Image (cartoon, helix red, strand yellow):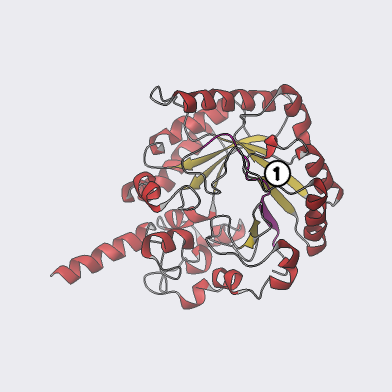
Amino acid sequence: LSAPTELHFSFTNKCSAGCTHCYTNSVPDAKEEFTLEDMKKHIDRLADFGVFHIALGGGESLERDDIFEIAAYIRTKNMVPNLTTSGLPMTPEMAKRCNIFGQINVSIDSLIPDPSQPRLAAHLQKSMEALKMLIQHGNKTGINCVINRYNYDQIPAILKFAKENKLADVEFLRLKSSGRATFSIFNNLNCTPEQHRDFWPTLLKYSKKYKQDVKIDCSYVPMMAYHSPDKKLMEKFCVKGCDGGNLLAAADHKGRVKACSFSHEFAGKLEDIRDEWGKNENFLKYVNWSKSAIEPCKSCNYLSLCKGGCHVVAETVNNDFFSPDPECPKVYAYNQRKKAEASQ
């Protein structure tokens, strides 16, 4: 595309939550912040470029006093501002003003308070209160849930909770190694091969049972493709794998842009995104990955849609951006066969 339709903008790195797997490595006392005028210039630039939707994140966007001014300015440029929040700073007054956003998603990874971690239990309570306030004031509200091996079994309960509380949807996100989620943390939290294999049937079963709308991030498409869904139906509903550098782009609190929020490499500055788009190698390697795909991706019927899975996970685990996603059930089975053959 000539411009990304969606830009994920982590425009602040300030956040008091302290999540161990924070992919932006946000901290409570972050100093580097855009001014409101800086933000307006960036928003003007993105509007002129042709971006449709800006997903505001951080850090914790609600810790900025001017968050609603920023969102309102995005609206004046005929773009939609959406918001992801921990919910910790939410107040009734904020909840009233959140109708400026297209949707607000509250990050909740578990419904079960952990008594061994009282601070996190308190965070969960505040996040739940934020959800109630947002719903009470008529906001389109959902949940973002990062799935790991320890909360995987809560998928049914999370979907039931969402339905009971009339949430717009639940978006399940796959764990990636970025920011504070170092390789050791990723390796201790990522789902097991069996969980990845069973993820899609589990989602189908319980989303149907509770009649709850569900979204998955693009890195989960390999887990879906493993079960041979109708390819034409996937194409009809634009179900795709990694679209970094094409439909999607990301920018951080320093104004650096990249193909994906979790990417470890940048493709220049936000000021230059129009010039770099479709030219910078750190965009193009995402867009063109499928052209140099190796087995088992090369011969996979879903390559054109899946696009090799999550390249950030591949780079983390295999130290090779261009290798197949090792957590894809098909790739995992292929690698296991190769290991067995080599040991004979």
What's under tag 1, amino acid-wise?
Asn
Q: Mark 1 points at which residue?
A: 82
- Horizontal side of residue 191 vs 93, given as left or right: left
Q: Magenta region's main secondary structure?
A: loop
Q: Residues within 10 Å of mark 1 (few under 14, many from 20)?
A: some
Q: Among all residues in the image, which is located at the extreme right?
A: 76
Residue 195 horizontal/vertical position (percent): 35, 46
Q: Is residue 266 above or below residue 114?
A: below
Q: Does residue 12 show up magenta in the picture?
A: yes
Q: Is residue 222 above or below residue 278?
A: above
Q: Quarter-wise, where is residue 260 in the image?
A: bottom right
Stretch of the chain drawn in magenta: 4-18
- Quadrant including the C terminus: bottom left
Quick one: 117 or 237, which is closer to the camera? 117
x 52%, y 37%: residue: 18
Q: SS of the residue at dot 1?
A: strand
Residue 11 horizontal/vertical position (percent): 68, 49
Q: Quarter-wise, where is residue 284 in the image?
A: bottom right
x 73%, y 72%: residue: 275
